[in-house]
Amino acid sequence: MRPIRWPLVKELARKDLEEIAQSRQLLYPLFVVPVFLTGDALLTFSLAANGLSTNGLSTQSAFFTFAEFLLLLPVILPILLGASSVVLEKSNRTLEPLLSTPLTDTELLVGKALAPLVPALALTGASYTVYSLGALAIVNSREPLTNLPWGSLLLAAFVLAPLLGLLSTFVALAVSTKAKEVRSAQQIATLLILPLLLAVIGVGLAVGPNLLGQLAFALAIAAVAYAVLQVTVSRFHRDQILVAGV
Amino acid sequence: MEEYLVASDLTRSYGGPTPAVDGLSFSVRRGELFALLGPNGAGKTTTIRLLTGLLGPTRGTAYVGGLDVRDLDAGPEIRRHIGLLPEAAGLYESLTVRRNLELFGRLFGLSGTDLDGRVRTQLLSLGLADRAEQKAGTLSKGLKQRLAIARALLHEPDCVVLDEPTSGLDPEAAKGVRDALLALRASGRTVILSTHHLEDADRLADRVAVIRGRLLALDTPAGLKERLFRHLVAIELLRADARAEELLGSVEGVRSVTREGTRLTFEVGTGEEIVPSGVEALVRGGYRVRSVAALNPTLEDAYLRVIGAASTPPSGAA
């Protein structure tokens, strides 16, 4: 297999990011969703830590539960950005010139995947940082910080979030290559990702701050991501992309 | 002259009962300006996509500079040698004119001062220098087309492929594109042009191929006209009717007589006596001749005849 030429991949991803940066339609939700979710997680954690939680969550459980809550970000954000990635090139008729460059199919796929994945993971990381600092400030005066399940938080931020981000990106791209228009691509991708969203919430609640349980969940996500990657790769040939949706 | 591009039994089907392109075989010489002609849906765009390696053939193949378009590993190399101007300019409208060129330059492996120099050269040669920092979406259609041409030429390809480059342009912008095409041919590049504008093809092309799914005709514009019409003559009478048409048609060497008002148009084969004999037959029949003129058929006449012949069902067909 021909080695990936990273300068070309980076240029493609950079172009996509520049387009995202100039699109209010994409930019607003990209920042609003993380701010809303992080703010909500911190507020609810603060209530629980102050004994105001209606469902009687302990501080530890609340800390973990709302850390898991932030895993929705690497699922939602790549769909928001990635589902329009290829179909927008088709509807703007920029796809043909792009496909006529020496980029290989693999380089196209990687470049197209990086553009939604990088901002999604960067914003997820920022959200986890804000959440951790906020949680520290909330519990600082009440109990030892070591009581909080930091291992679970780190696993969520550094293992689960990238895996979920990859999975979500591959789903978005697979849909985008076959879709006829942006709106339908986003709707179909959202529909496909819905079970994943439910799984994230469900497993988070069921497993709790249990490292082994979380690792098992991470392995399951990795397996699904690999399967979806195979499907995406099999569909990501310039011939099929050009003809699909015509 | 060396053959740069060879199509051999090139066929592409999209799953329907009839292939979009069926068994095309032709070659394009290095430095030649080759025009693909055909009605809408004739398979011109599919042919271009097959020749540039964007689509894979269902059967047959094409060679570009000796590289087989079926060879996936050769794809990037084939595309590096080709500059494509698709039917729609396909610019990134939220990016500036300069950024559009820089992006494609980098995707073609250019960088640093080489890229800067080439971008500057293209901006100057296509009259876009003062628009370099303007967003592509704010350009007029003619300027967008020029930017798309600049993009196709940036990496200095051996072969430039243009799909309907003057489509939808006003006469001034279309002339700008034609001038760019002439400059390309003068620079020794191989140019493949798909167009509906038969005047453009007649004026610019070294050879034309008429396709309608299949290859219907392939020749120089002059050769095609000569082959299809030989010599076309018009006789203007004071009064013309079906009998005059019959009389003229009965003269040996006269073919395909048509009547339009008081004018009889016909083709003549070889032989100096055919036209005088035709005139004599009409005069003897009591018709008064106002004028006799040799007509120069246009490429459009030839094209319509080729397409018309392809549309006519074979005798005995239902």
Image: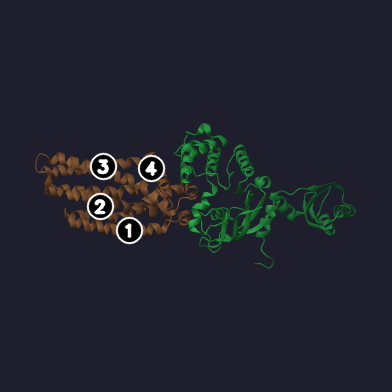
Chain colours: A brown, B green
| Mark 1: amino acid | Tyr
The answer to whether marks 2 and 3 sit on the same chain is: yes
- Mark-to-mark CA distance, 2 and 3: 15 Å
Along the polypeptide, which appears first: circle 1 or circle 4? 4
The quadrant in which the N terminus of chain A is found is: bottom left
Q: Element under label 2?
A: helix
- Mark-to-mark CA distance, 1 and 2: 14 Å
Q: Residues within 10 Å of mark 3 (few under 14, many from 20)?
A: some
- Mark-to-mark CA distance, 1 and 4: 25 Å
Which residue lies under the disc numbered 2? A160
The answer to whether marks 1 and 4 sit on the same chain is: yes
Along the polypeptide, which appears first: circle 3 or circle 4? 4
| Mark 2: amino acid | Leu
Please provide percent x and percent y for residue B34.
63, 50
Q: Residues within 10 Å of mark 1 (few under 14, many from 20)?
A: some
The answer to whether marks 3 and 4 sit on the same chain is: yes
Q: Could you say which disc has been placed on residue A17 in the image?
A: 4
